[in-house]
Image (cartoon, rainbow, N blue to C red):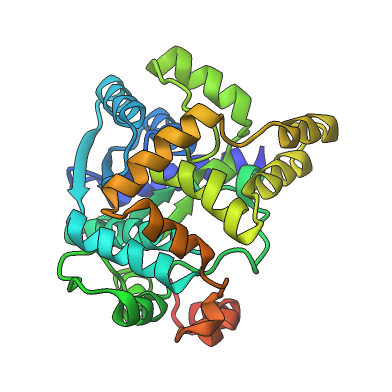
Amino acid sequence: EVALAYLEQLAATIRSDGRQKKYDCVIGVSGGVDSTMVAYTVKKLGLRPLAVHLDNGWDAELAVSNIEKTLNKLGIDLLTHVIDWEEFRDLQLSFFKASVANVEVLTDHAIMAILFKTAARNSIKYVISGGNVVTEAIMPQSWMYDSRDLRHIAAIHEKYGSVPLRTLPHCSLLEYFYYIFIRRIKYVPVLNYISYKKDDAKKLIEKELDWRDYGGKHYESIFTRFFQAYYLPEKFKIDKRRAHLSTLLCSGQITRDDAMKEMERPAYSPELFQQDLEFFIKKMKLSREEWDCIMALPVRTYKDYPSNRFIFRINPWIIRWIKYIVKP
């Protein structure tokens, strides 16, 4: 009840702050459950969102269909940013050559950058996120790395890349400081303020928005499916289902028996894996031999490359200090 009351108050503030503008908030859409529920929730709150989709070249057809149906039914305008594929392919390939696990930080970084830049360009003060604690709070730090670290991304690309990054959406730490503390753009994880249960959410959006399920978490992207179901487990012995299921277990959405049964199932069917592997190799312009060589490279971590990890390690204390001296 307290969370819902806060959400109603927050929605009233967002409506008030954006009353003379075409849009009062920015949301990201991917065709997945979380972003679809964000779109549904903000409309129920009477907000006027601008939806932003980052097309990184890996969208599944079902994801595109889900986005179109959702936004059409809800009457939400869409801005799609299409990444230059040759640039992004070269950037992803440089991370594979670097032999690090955190290849998905590239898409995550670009998404955050385009959301904040879109909000700033349209003088919008709120970026509303699908991030939430009940379905994705648990993730071992050793598995992934902070997607906001532009220095880390640039360092790996400089070492292994060959195509200049002229159009990739990006955001430095100074730019984040500018957007958050100068422009006062707020990042709102709206799903944390509602009763958010994954299975119930799926049933709701299937009924109300004709949304269709795509399988595993974040499998609305062909790359993410290949990355999570094959690349991470095969090369790094990381099965992200453990983290995702642990979060659902801790939030009371599944039982331990449910989680154990899910872990016993293969992450990939042999047919879908072969289909995705062939598609991936062709799209990345690799031979099977070249890909096998990449898979055989010694495992490395983000610590083996330049980064701003020290800053991100003390980031919570920095944020508290800045919020204390920079009053709202």
Determine whether, in the image, residue 260 is placed left or right of residue 4: right
| Quarter of the picture holding the C terminus | bottom left
Determine whether, in the image, residue 71 is placed left or right of residue 196: left
In this orientation, which residue lies closer to the viewer: 146 or 153? 153
- The answer to whether residue 215 shows anywhere in this view is no
Name, please, the residue furthest toward the top.
207
**Res 266 → quadrant:** top right
Picture coordinates of residue 186 (x, y %)? 40, 60
Query: Compared with residue 66, is residue 87 higher up or lower down, i.e. above or below?
Result: below
Which residue sits at x=34%, y=40%? Answer: 279
Name, please, the residue furthest toward the right.
257
Picture coordinates of residue 88 (x, y %)? 26, 60
Picture coordinates of residue 231 (x, y %)? 52, 52
Which residue sits at x=16%, y=65%? Answer: 167
- The answer to whether residue 3 shows anywhere in this view is yes
| Quarter of the picture holding the N terminus | top right
Query: Compared with residue 34, is residue 170 higher up or lower down, i.e. above or below?
Result: below
**Res 303 → quadrant:** bottom right
Which residue sits at x=77%, y=44%? Answer: 250
In this orientation, which residue lies closer to the viewer: 34 or 182? 34
Which residue sits at x=49%, y=82%? Answer: 322
Query: Compared with residue 289, is residue 164 higher up or lower down, i.e. above or below?
Result: below
Determine whether, in the image, residue 255 is placed left or right of residue 89: right
In this orientation, which residue lies closer to the viewer: 171 or 75? 171
Q: How many marks?
A: 0
Name, please, the residue furthest toward the front.
289
Picture coordinates of residue 286 (x, y %)? 31, 55
